[in-house]
Image (spheres, grey):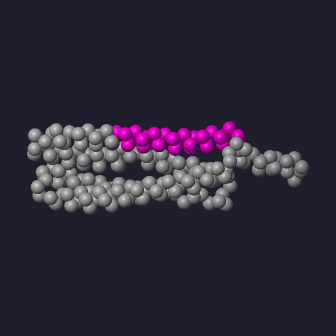
Amino acid sequence: MTEQDDALRALWKTRSVPPSIDIEKVRKEARRMTWRIKLRNLAEWAACAFIVPFFASTATRPELPWLSRAASVWISLSGVLVAMWVWRYGRAKALPDPGLDTRGYLHAHRDQLLTQAALLRSTPRWYFFPLGSGVLLFHLGFLLEHPESWARVAPSVVFSVLLMAVLIWANQRGASRLEAQAEALDDDFEEEV
C-alpha cells in the first residue's frame, strides 16, 4: 500500500461524518423522541381503556335510541381499532445501537422520524373517521328520535367537529415537523459528504 492510499483512506474516514452534525445531539433527540412516543401511546391506550367499556355499556341502555346504541358499539369497536393501530404502527422503534457508525445511527433516527410522521398523516383514516363517525351517529340517533332536542345536540356536534378538525390539523402539522427534521438530517449529511 502506498502513502497515497493511506491518505485517501484517512480522508474517507474523516468525511464519513459531516462536521455540522452533532451526533450526541441527535442521540439525545432520539432518546427524547422515544420517550415522547411512549407517553403518547400510554395516553392513547388509557383513553381507549376508558372509551371501550364506557361505550360498550352505553350500548346496553334501552332508553337510548337504537341508532345511538349502535353508534356506541361502533365507538367501542373503534377504540379497540385505535389501540391496536397504535400498538402495531405507533410504537417507538428500539433506539439505534450505539455501536452503529454515525451514518447508520442517523439513518435509523431518520426512519423513526418518518415512521411517526406517516402515523400522524394517516390519523384521519384510522383514528378520526371511525371515532368521529361514531360520535356523529350517536348524536344523529337522538335527533332522529327527538327532533326537538336539536338545540341541546347541536352544540355538542359543533364542538365534536371543531375538535376533530383542530386535532387533524395538529397531527398534520406534527407530521410536517417530523418530515422536516428527517429532511434536515438528509440535507446536512448530503451537503457535507
Q: Nearer the viewer, residue 67 or 192?
A: 67
> Is residue 157 located in the magenta-colored stretch of the structure?
no
For residue 18, side relative to residue 82 (left or right) = right
Residue located 29% across and 57% down the image: 51
The answer to whether any part of residue 84 appears in the image is no
Outermost residue toward the right? 3
Tell me residue 73's x, y (percent): 22, 56
- Is residue 127 visible to the viewer in this orientation of the structure? yes
- Closest to the observer: 173 or 159? 159
Of residues 96 and 32, the one drawn nearer to the viewer in this rendering: 32
Residue 1: percent from left, percent from top: 87, 53
The C terminus, quarter of image: top right
The residue stretch that appears in magenta? 164-193
The residue sitting at 29% across, 49% down in the picture is 131
| Residue 179 is one of the magenta-drawn residues | yes
Q: Position of residue 137 (x, y in %)?
A: 20, 46
**Chief SS of the magenta region:** helix
Q: Which quadrant of the figure has residue 140?
A: top left
Image mark count: 0
Q: Is residue 38 left or right of residue 11?
A: left
Please tell me which residue is depicted at 61% across the width and 42% down the height of the picture.
186
Q: Is residue 61 left or right of residue 106?
A: left
The answer to whether 31 appears left or right of 63 in the picture is: right
Q: Residue 78 at what x, y percent from top left?
A: 29, 54
Tell me the residue at 26%/56% (across/down).
Answer: 76
